[in-house]
Amino acid sequence: MNNKIKSLLTTAFILSFVNPAKALEVNISPVAPQQGDTISVTITTDDPDSIPTLNLNQKTYPVLPIDNGYRAFVPTSPLDTPGKLTIQVTGDGTTKNLGVWLKKRSFPVQRIWLSGKASRPATQLELNRVGEFKKLVTPEKYWNGTFVRPNAARVSSVFGVRRYYNGVFANNYYHKGVDYAGSAGSTVVAPAAGKVRLVGKEAQGFHVHGNTVGIDHGQGVLSIFLHLQSINVQEGDFVKPGQKIGTVGNTGASTGPHLHWGLYVNGVAVDPVPWRFGEIK
């Protein structure tokens, strides 16, 4: 072997340590999600200038920076078909296809009868305001740790319930939150830090939602509170976990005093329970 070849091999050997191959690492939690779970996908790359992408079923999900990498949330709902999900992550010049099995979950069925004021259709005003709120994806992350219970009363209706309204089954509907059977006037608190981005009142046209507060927890995670009696915050306020935001009421399409807490992730209503009992960083 002549000196020129030796020199080239030595240079290549040194460069292999100076410029190691790019490494894309992806972790998914929970590893065995069920309908209604939020799938958290954490991504680390060797190239700080390259933001990875995540796709599922031809839909692209926001990938946002967190400590030591990136993270994307993939929301699931009771309307999703159980079975294999193929999450595609691209970064560092490579693509990984990760198979995740979404487990089937049983949801109760309820029969609800609405009459009088509670049976009024939604106004275009509330549909527009709530629709705009649900689209928010703020780059900043405001929450830290597990979410707290927004009301001390017992749970009267769990997430994902399928319903008959006035005898008619709602095919593409599921209960998009958790209901607490709080007495009228009992305290409602923020479950996590965030900015108040929506305040709506029944008197202004929120006929279905009633008096409403929407909190942006950042990075596509949003809380909405319905049927309130009173509201103690204004749009633009920053709230801390446990801070009073209003009181339980019976406004809007409600059959009695209660609090509805809905949690939305990237525009999809997910089960809030894992956010309370299993920390999602």
Image (tube, helix red, strand yellow):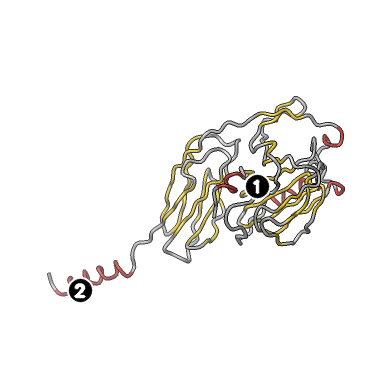
Left or right, residue 161 beside residue 168: left
Residue 186 drawn at (x, y percent) = 77, 47
Count of labels in the image: 2
Is label 1 or label 2 in front? 1
Question: On the image, which quarter does residue 217 sit in?
Answer: bottom right
Determine which residue is flagged by label 2.
7
Question: On the image, which quarter does residue 173 sit in?
Answer: top right
Residue 86 drawn at (x, y percent) = 47, 43
Q: Nearer the viewer, residue 196 or 52?
A: 196
**Circle 1: is it few (<14), some (14-19), or many (20+) Cα within 10 Å?**
many
Element at label 2: helix
Determine which residue is flagged by label 1.
263
Q: Residue at x 71, y 42 (%)?
A: 153
Element at label 1: strand
Q: Amino acid at mark 2?
A: Ser
Question: Quadrant where the N terminus lies?
Answer: bottom left
